[in-house]
Amino acid sequence: MANDPLHGKNVVIVGFARQGQALARWLPTLGAEVTVTDGKSAEALGINTADYPGVDFVMEEHPDSLLDSADVLCVSGGVPLTIPFIQAAVERGISLSNDAQLFLERCPARVIGITGSAGKTTTTTLTGQMLEGAGFKTWVGGNIGNVLTDVLADIGADDTVVMELSSFQLELMTRSPQIAAILNVTPNHLDRHGTMEAYTAAKASIITHQSPDDVAVLGYDDSGSYGLRDNVHGNLLWFSSESMISDGAFLLGQRLMLVGDANPSGEAHMICDYKDVPLRGEHNLRNVLAACTLAGAAGVTPEVMANVIRAFEGVLHRQEVVRVLNDVTYVNDSIATAPERVLAALRSYQEPLVLLVGGADKKLPWDEMLQLAARKSRHIIAFGGSAADIVETQLHDMDFDDFTRVKTVEEAIVKAHELAIAGDVVLLSPGGTSYDAYHDFAERGNHFRERVNAL
């Protein structure tokens, strides 16, 4: 595309996972000169460089010589901005961007953006289904897994895009979606961002660059999200499971309500009963209320919302019931890569739990979660790396004796199968990342599902 700002520019893609690979497919179509650099080899990444014609590759290193001709660095989400190569680019005045920023700059359609420490994928999926149910031509993607640059050429001006955005993407962005939600802001990714202030600033970027005509949706019950209300430049809507609000969605007794500017009719309207929500836990109720607020702001009626809510089956790896065997329920919550997410899962169950926790720690506090886990679990099994060390130490200090330490998820499943009795829930809700043993949380969850189904 000769009229694109990147036509003829030298673009260096830093990091060649899913986002980087999508950029390497798309940027050459704009006429950009593209070079990929990654600290790993092509073999280690499982890619064939021949699949990317016209793209140069410099692998297993990030030589500063690549900066001599670079106009833009496109940084993949998994690459910290603090690495020397990127810092050297900043010192030279080279622009930094990423796939989400480039997409927003070129997308002809209205974009609904969703971020938060937890609940992003469930809310994004549900919002997209509500828009589809209302007849909007809808594209769902971003951090949820579908790279939107792959379909940008097919998106029309009258379409709607629902886009999940991570803090890693947002910390670089200077453009905000027309409708944007911050579901919650709780400690997460501090191993990457360093401080809560930096992490919160990254999340706030989703609304920071909005115009007065845009819509921001915040969580009324979450102090982190609520605290960003002064960052709103456009129309402010809320969602709450605890308080009545004047603009947004909330729970009134056992009814989900839509009021104010979140309701296309402009009147207070019941969406559905709480019992119609098929997902467990108050955190999921808030996800549903957030989706209703976003969909309402986009023109979806409460009747359509209710139909979608009743039929919603949830998302893989998020309190996913894998199997019931001998009256023991096995649940895959591999997405819980922070203790805060495990807390939400624990609060969803009244049944006795055999809890599987572990993985790699993100330098987050575990105390509150483990205290609740000790009260609700018949047995706790820790697996894997640094997170399991923390679990073992803290449970020992709490004099919690119903504890087993194993090396792998597979060993944890075998042990849980031995220990669980009728009526128990075996819950994989790790609290740590998967990177000590897996490519990502989905691979860990898939392995859990495979081994449980083989019992």
Image (tube, rainbow, N blue to C red):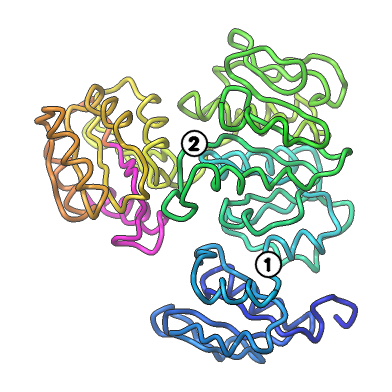
Q: Is residue 420 above or below residue 248?
A: below
Dot 2: what SS? loop
Across and down, in percent, residue 93 comes to: 70, 74
Task: Quarter of the image for the N terminus: give it.
Answer: bottom right
Q: Is residue 343 above or below residue 121?
A: above
According to the picture, the residue beneath numbered tag 2 turns out to be 186
Q: Residue furthest front?
A: 91
User: Residue at horizontal 57%, vertical 51%?
Assistant: 167
Q: In the rendered structure, which segment of residues is drawn in magenta?
A: 427-455
According to the picture, the residue beneath numbered tag 1 turns out to be 97
Q: Which mark is residue 258?
A: none
User: Residue at horizontal 83%, vertical 24%?
Assistant: 261
State the CA–CA distance, disc 2 to disc 1.
Answer: 26 Å
Across and down, in percent, residue 360 comes to: 31, 53
Q: Is residue 449 magenta?
A: yes
Q: Is residue 336 magenta?
A: no
In the drawing, does residue 330 fall left or right of residue 213?
left
Q: Is residue 112 above or below residue 397?
A: below
Query: Which quarter of the figure has residue 152?
Result: bottom right
Mark 1 residue type: Ser
Q: Nearer the viewer, residue 261 or 141?
A: 261
